[in-house]
Image (spheres, rainbow, N blue to C red):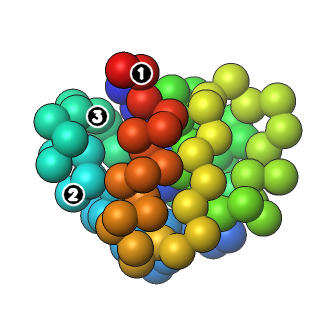
Amino acid sequence: MKVLCVCGLGQGTSLILRMNVESVLKDLNVQADVEHTDVSTASGTAADFIVTSNELAQSLPGHAAKIVVVNNYFDLDEIKSSLQGALPS
């Protein structure tokens, strides 16, 4: 499974999100290849899931990945809840 963590420029914020997503997935015992990137690159990159803000999610219409919206990239509980809602049971 491939997960993209996306912010506007693909640098600081998406890296923080990536580390937090990796931590949450580890807690959930989910194996995934997690990468961070900018929204422009994400639009042309194959992935199973994209984790991003609601604003940036609107910049990815028609992407084949399931979009997981997270409002606070630092809130592990929110990230966990959003991912659990998106991952197959």
- Please state which amino acid type lies under the numbered disc 2: Ser
Q: Quadrant of the N terminus?
A: top left
Tell me the kind of residue under disc 1: Pro
Residue 81 in the image: x percent, y percent?
42, 52
Instruction: Point out the tag, 1 or 3, that comes first from the N-terminus.
Output: 3
Q: Residue at x 78, y 44 (%)?
A: 60
Q: Indicate the secondary structure of the residue bearing disc 3.
A: loop
Compute the Cα span from label 2 to label 3: 11 Å
Q: Amino acid at mark 3?
A: Ala
Give the residue pinned by disc 1: 88
- Number of numbered tags placed on the structure image: 3
Q: Is residue 82 above or below residue 87?
A: below
Taking depth in this image into account, of 84 and 43 the one nearest to the observer is 84
Read off the residue under disc 2: 23
Residue 32 is tagged as 3
In the image: residue 21, left or right of residue 28: right
Quarter where residue 2 is shown: top left
Counting residues from the start of the chain, the first of labels 2 and 3 encountered is 2
Compare residues 83 and 66 and report the one nearer the observer: 83
User: Dividing the picture into quarters, in which one does residue 10 lie?
Assistant: bottom right
Residue 74 pos. (x, y %)? 40, 77
Whether residue 15 is visible to the viewer of this picture, yes or no, is: no
